[in-house]
Every structure is written in C-alpha cells, then in structure tokens.
Image (cartoon, rainbow, N blue to C red):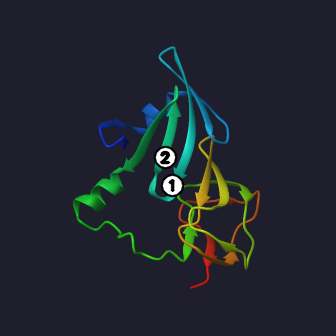
C-alpha cells in the first residue's frame, strides 16, 4: 500500500494493483495518464527520488507530492526516521530496474541533488540524485546493467 500526500493537505491510499490500472505514458519528465476516460498531462519539475518527493505541474498548477510506503509509515510510527544530518557514502538501487544512463565518472566531483544515473523501472525513468556534495569513489554500474533493489550503485569518498 502506498500513501500519496499532496501539498501536505490531501492524502490518498493506493495499492500496487490500483496503480497498475492507470493507463500511463511516461517520458523523461512528462506523464500522460488516462483514468476513467479523463486525460491528464503532467510534468515533473523537481525530483528528490531518494526521499520520494516530487513537484508536479498539472494545468499550470504546481503540487508538492510525497509518496510513502508501508515501511515509511512503520519507521515514522516507531520514531526511527533517519535524521537530515546523516552522511550517505553510497547510493543503492531503490528498486529493481535497468540502468539507462550514468552521468558521472570515478573521481568526478558532484553537488548534492545532481543526477548521477537514470534507472528505468515499471515503465518509468527515475533520475537518482547525489545525496550530498562529494567525489565519486567507485561506480558499480554501467549503462545497460540490470540491478536489484538494494544493489550498490555508486560509492563516494569519505
């Protein structure tokens, strides 16, 4: 079960089966959804994939969308949420998929929020962003690799 929170005002619960019933066409940052005969075009204007936060533009209006899964709810309920000051030295695959682009190289300096690779999963392209400023220590992927959830993709120098 997923909870979709829009502008911290509206909350919708959806199962994986319900999500798969949408007629969805996706390109890099644009979406076209047909649901119950209604056509909706949207554009993703900002992405924080690791935290599952997105800014979506629909009909000229911007919405801040956060997607939570059952594990997120359990972690928050138990008071075990990770603090903002945590330093991430690795990027792991958030889901299984295909690496369709690698935007960085070993030894390259990157800024927090910069796209480091693109993972195609469930017919969607997901740009994975750098969790911090740093230097790439090692790449464990290349274009065309398939990855499983949790696989180590990129390491940063400490």
Q: Which quadrant of the figure contains the N terminus?
A: top left
- The quadrant holding residue 152 is bottom right
As drawn, is 148 to the left or to the right of 138? left
Residue extending farthest to the bottom is: 158
Residue extending farthest to the top is: 37
Residue 85 place in picture, x, y as percent? 40, 74
Between 38 and 149, the one lying in front of the other is: 38
Q: Which quadrant of the figure contains the C terminus?
A: bottom right
> Are discs 2 and 1 less than 8 Å apart at CB?
yes
Residue 74 place in picture, x, y as percent? 28, 57
Residue extending farthest to the left is: 78
Residue at disc 1, secondary structure: strand
Residue 40 place in picture, x, y as percent? 53, 23
> Which residue is at 41% across, 46% downward?
67
> Which residue is at 35% across, 69% downward?
82
> Which residue is at 28% across, 68% downward?
80
- Specify the label residue 153 is tagged with: none
Label 2 crowd (10 A; few <14 / some 14-19 / many >=20): some
Separation of marks 2 and 1 at Cα, in angstroms: 6 Å
Residue 95 place in picture, x, y as percent? 54, 55
As drawn, is 1 to the left or to the right of 49? left
Question: Which residue is denoted by mark 1 in the rendering?
Answer: 48
Residue at disc 2, secondary structure: strand
Question: Which residue is denoted by mark 2 in the rendering?
Answer: 54
- The quadrant holding residue 30 is top right
> Which residue is at 43% across, 31% downward?
18
């Amino acid at each position: 079960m997923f909870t979709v929170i829009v502008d911290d005002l509206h909350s919708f619960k959806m199962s994986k089966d319900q999500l798969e019933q949408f007629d969805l066409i996706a390109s890099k940052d644009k979406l076209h959804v047909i649901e119950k005969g209604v056509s909706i075009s949207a554009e993703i204007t900002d992405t924080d994939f690791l935290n599952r936060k997105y800014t979506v533009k629909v009909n000229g209006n911007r919405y801040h969308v956060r997607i939570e899964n059952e594990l997120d709810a359990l972690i928050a309920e138990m008071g075990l949420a990770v603090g903002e000051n945590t330093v991430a030295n690795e990027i792991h695959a958030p889901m299984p998929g295909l690496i369709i682009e690698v935007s960085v190289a070993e030894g390259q300096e990157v800024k927090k929020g910069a796209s480091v690779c693109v993972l195609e999963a469930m017919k969607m392209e997901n740009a994975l962003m750098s969790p911090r400023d740093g230097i790439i220590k090692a790449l464990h992927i290349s274009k065309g690799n398939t990855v499983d959830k949790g696989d180590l993709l990129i390491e940063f120098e400490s």
